[in-house]
Amino acid sequence: MTRRNLLSLGARMLLAAAVGHPLVAGDGHLSPAGWAFGRSAAAAEPKTETAVLAGGCFWCIELSFEQLAGVVDVESGYCGGTKETANYDQVRRGITGHAEAIRVTFDPSKITYGKLLDVFFSAHDPTQLNRQGNDIGRQYRSAIFFINEEQKKQAEAKIAELEQKRVHNKRIVTKLEPLTEFYPAELFHQDFARRNPWVPYIQGHAVPKAKEVRSKHPELLRRAP
């Protein structure tokens, strides 16, 4: 079942999702521990940085990053096209130039950009060109939208490292693209997996990817208070 088929649920699912649900933990059970964002009003605002990444369906990759310590916020959106076409109805056709992407706001004193790249390459298959599984089209391409030259250098080095170690059986096809603009996706798409863990697409795609990240990078996970 592809994600596109689910959107016919429309406003009915959006209303149900507003109730909110915990995420699925590494053992496959529902658990609220370590998955909620937010700080107390008295907490000092951390100095944050931003990473913009595309690795297929943004529902899936968003879930993988929401579980990381040091990640302040994860927002789904569109990158690579124009403002006029930055909406799901047009992006899903695959002709806008946009990729489904996430914008990760993080505290570099707790997690580095390099560690986020490690998670990124664990959370999707970077050898699939313009697709992830049954989700096919340029909107599902693997891409790193670098914000500055330092991010570009780190991304280039990470890809070279993975290629040298032969972590994947095929060549990595992840594109490095300069970030021009990030357009937030519609409210319906934000935190979709976290709010809708029972949806078959989420159980079949997003949850396994998040569990893969938990297995490979346990030291980066958000801990229960």
Image (cartoon, rainbow, N blue to C red):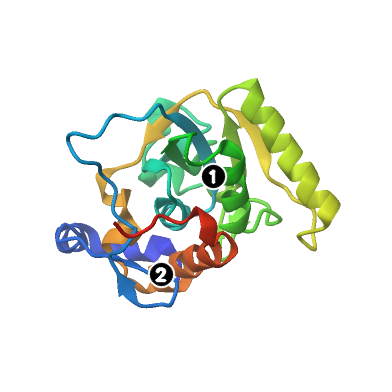
Residue 149's image quarter?
A: top right
What residue do we see at 63% from left, 52% from top?
Answer: 121
Residue 217 vs residue 200: left or right? Answer: right
Q: Residue at x 72, y 48 (%)?
A: 173
Q: Residue at x 56, y 59 (%)?
A: 217
Residue 185 percent coordinates (x, y): 35, 41
* Residue in the image at 37% along x and 74% along y: 200
Give the percent coordinates (x, y) of residue 143: 61, 41
Q: Which residue is mark 1?
A: 54
Classed neighbour count for the residue bearing mark 2: other residues with Cα under 10 Å, few (<14), some (14–19), many (≥20): many
**x%, y% of residue 135?**
53, 60
Give the quarter of the image for residue 40.
top left
In this rendering, is residue 27 above or below 169? below
**Secondary structure found at label 1:** strand
Nearest the eye: 32 or 195? 32
Above/below status of 113 relative to 4 = above
Tell me the number on the disc at residue 201. 2
Where is the N terminus found, in terms of image quarters?
A: bottom left
Amino acid type, label 2: Tyr
Asked if the residue at tag 2 contacts the one at tag 1, i.e. Cβ–Cβ closer than 8 Å, the answer is no
**Front residue of 10 and 64:** 64
Q: Is residue 96 visible?
A: no
